[in-house]
Every structure is written in C-alpha cells, then in structure tokens.
Amino acid sequence: MSQSLSDQSLPVICLMGATATGKTDLAVRLAERLPCDLISVDSALIYRGMDIGTAKPDVELLTRAPHRLIDICDPIESYSAAEFRRDALNEIETTHRNGRIPLLVGGTMLYFKALLEGLASLPKADPVIRQQLLEQAETEGWAVLHRRLQQLDPVSAQRIHPNDPQRLQRALEVYELTGKTLTQLWQEQQAAVLPFTPLQLSIEVADRALLHRRIEQRFHAMIESGFEQEVRALYQRGDLDPSMPSIRCVGYRQMWAYLEGETSSDTMIERGIIATRQLAKRQMTWLRSWSGAQRIDACDPNIVSNTLKFVDDYLI
RNA sequence: GGUGAGGUUCCCGAGUGGCCAAAGGGAUCAGACUGUAAAUCUGACGCGCAAGCUUCGGUGGUUCGAAUCCACCCCUCACCA
C-alpha cells in the first residue's frame, strides 16, 4: 500500500503565485473540472478566525471546493515549514488513497520548497532557549551573538547577516539543543525530497502596476467587509500579541497597531497596502528563481482551459 | 492688503559658505531565504560604464567657492485686517 502511494507516477499539482493574483479562483475552477482535492499552502490561512484579512476562500467557495490545511491552528499557536511538510504529505497520501489528485495551492514559497526538496533533520523551536537568546541580545546586542556563532559555526556566520536576529537566534538555538552546528546537521542528512514528480504551475500578473491596483482594491474591500471587527475580536481575547506569527500577518499587524491607538485609520490602510505589495514582491522573487514551473498569465481570458492543457499533458 | 513661517532629490525631512549628489526615514526596484516565512534580512536608489554632468521654487547678485549670504519675483501655510 505505502509502496504504491509513493509511486513517482502518482500525480501532484502545485499552483503557486503571489498574493492577489487569483490563485484561489483558478484553483477552484480547476477543481470543478478535475478530480482534485485542494490543499492549501499558506502560512496565514491555517489560522481560525482570520478570514477576511487573509482573503480566505469564503464558505460558499469552500463548499464548492474544500481546502485542506485551512483553519488548523488557533492564532496563539505557531506553525512551521516542517509541520507543513508532514501535514501536506499526509493530505497528499489521503487524496491519492481516495483516487483523487492533490492540488496544492498557495503563496508560501518556503512551504513549497520544504515539501518539494525536504528539510534537514533539525530540532523544533524551543521557546525557553529562544527567550534566553533574546534576553542576551537585549543586554549584549546581536553583534555579540553573531560573534559567538562565528566561533561555533563560521560557515553559518558567514551566511547569516549580523542584523538578521531571526536566523541568528535559530542557528544558536539549534546548537544549544543539539550541540551540533547547522552546518554539521545539514551535511549529516540528505534532505528527503518529494516522492512524486509534481506539475508546477506559477500564476503571474505580468503588469506590476495592475497587481498593485488589485492589492489596493482588495485591501479596501477587506475593510468594507469588516476586517476591523475581525481583528478587534482577536485583540479583545487578551492573550494575543504582535510577537506571534498570526498577528504579524500582513494587515493584521497594521490593524493591531491601529487598535492599540498607535496609528490613524488612514495610516493603517496605507501601511497595510504597502505591506501587501512587499509580500507580493518577495513571493515573486521566489518564483523568479524557481525552476521547472510553468508560467500562467493571470490575465489570460482563457486561463482555465489553457491551464488544463498543462494538466492534460502532465497526466498522460 | 499687513505680519510671521516656509518652499531641498518620488514623499516626509535634516542641512544655514567648502568635508553636499546633499543625513535619516518612507516608498520603489533587485536579491537572500532549511522548523517564526504574510516572517526575517541584504543591496540599489539624480544622470552616466567612466572621466564627468545636471540638481536644493525662479531670476540676478556677493564670493576663489552658495542648498546655505543679499535683492527682487512666484507659490504655500498661519495669524492680523
């Protein structure tokens, strides 16, 4: 059974694209024409109660085309690329077992990369160690921590910029936890790649100005749909704060600052739009360096039938 | 009409005679990315490959040298009428 499930010939379709390019819409339309089950590849859609600001498919859409790996976490939790890989592989297996095709859709490129190329065997995040490192950074400065990494693991120190607290923290955390450096651990274990040969599709809006307009319009639409109320509900829980991945999500972070009284409504909207544009840009940087993905023009009037051609060729 | 404050590179905003193509921030563009990734970080950012060239509301002046000083003009804001 498990033999056949990791058969290279079993189909897996990946649809990746930046925010506001129409990924979800295309995925749903494909799912209506193919025996596909949708699996979300999105680090924000995992959160329950975060619907409007993440442009989560609405109930109607989810009824037409159910997505897996949506609403799997409370906003107080954090998730990771490794957990995603595990969960996604499970969902892929289930889908195959049901005789259907997994269609992975999303814009979290690290998750796609982790799924396709695997991850080294590393320890998971440790809140206690992270807190200790954070405190050291506050008293001694990150430069000191970078120098420490330089001693322990010159290769990683070379790669990780002294101003990059997140990666510095992670590198030192891994060493604390295992007594081994990131460099060693990477060398020790060859990452397990995806046991399938997926069709990779990249949906792109060629005209940057158009994408920017779409982002702006969509953000305003979110506001009109009650985005403030959605975040206010999270805010009023009292157990969430901007250090958490959920509240750091694009739009939520800016709305949070507004609810804290730190910015005006206009500023919140402006900065939310800016943050979305910057997110899209980073996603596009990933995609540009991605090899092996078929490009799909988001503005193609025959986008569905043209995409189906790629799928047909792949499934033969 | 009068008085005061001000007009700086896409925006905000420093700069008050040379060390200024002009601090800093934002935007934008490009890039990186192995358990936080909608995160975190890096670079570029007047024009030019370069020598160099053109900028600090406008015009003229002072000076070896002006974004910085002077004169006039245009515009903005505040207050008084």
Image (cartoon, rainbow, N blue to C red):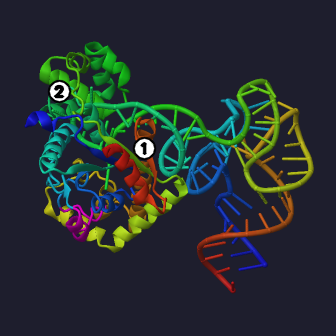
Q: Residue at x 52, y 52 (%)?
A: A206
The quadrant where residue A175 appears? top left
When the figure is inspected, residue A164 is found, relative to residue A70, above or below; the finding is above
| Quadrant holding the N terminus of chain A | top left
Assess whether mark 1 and mark 2 are in contact (beta carbons under 8 angstroms).
no
Subunit that carries the residue with mark 1:
A
The image position of residue A34, as x and y in percent, is: 27, 57
Give the residue type at disc 1: Gln
Residue A108 visible (yes or no): no
Label 2, label 1: how far apart the Cα atoms are:
32 Å
Choose between A244 and A12: the one closer to the eye: A12
Choose between A197 and A314: the one closer to the eye: A314
Tag 1 residue: A294
Give the residue type at disc 2: Leu
Q: Is residue B20 left or right of residue A280?
A: right
Would residue A32 be counted in the magenta stretch?
no
The image position of residue A278, as x and y in percent, is: 43, 49
Instruction: Identify the secondary structure beneath mark 2.
Output: loop
Would residue A53 be counted in the magenta stretch?
yes
| Residues at discs 2 and 1 both on one chain | yes
Q: Is residue A1 left or right of residue A157?
A: left
Prevailing secondary structure class for the magenta stretch in the rendered image: loop
When the figure is inspected, residue A37 is found, relative to residue A131, above or below; the finding is below
The image position of residue A150, as x and y in percent, is: 31, 16
The quadrant where residue A255 appears? bottom left
Q: Which residues are magenta?
A: A49-65
Tag 2 residue: A122
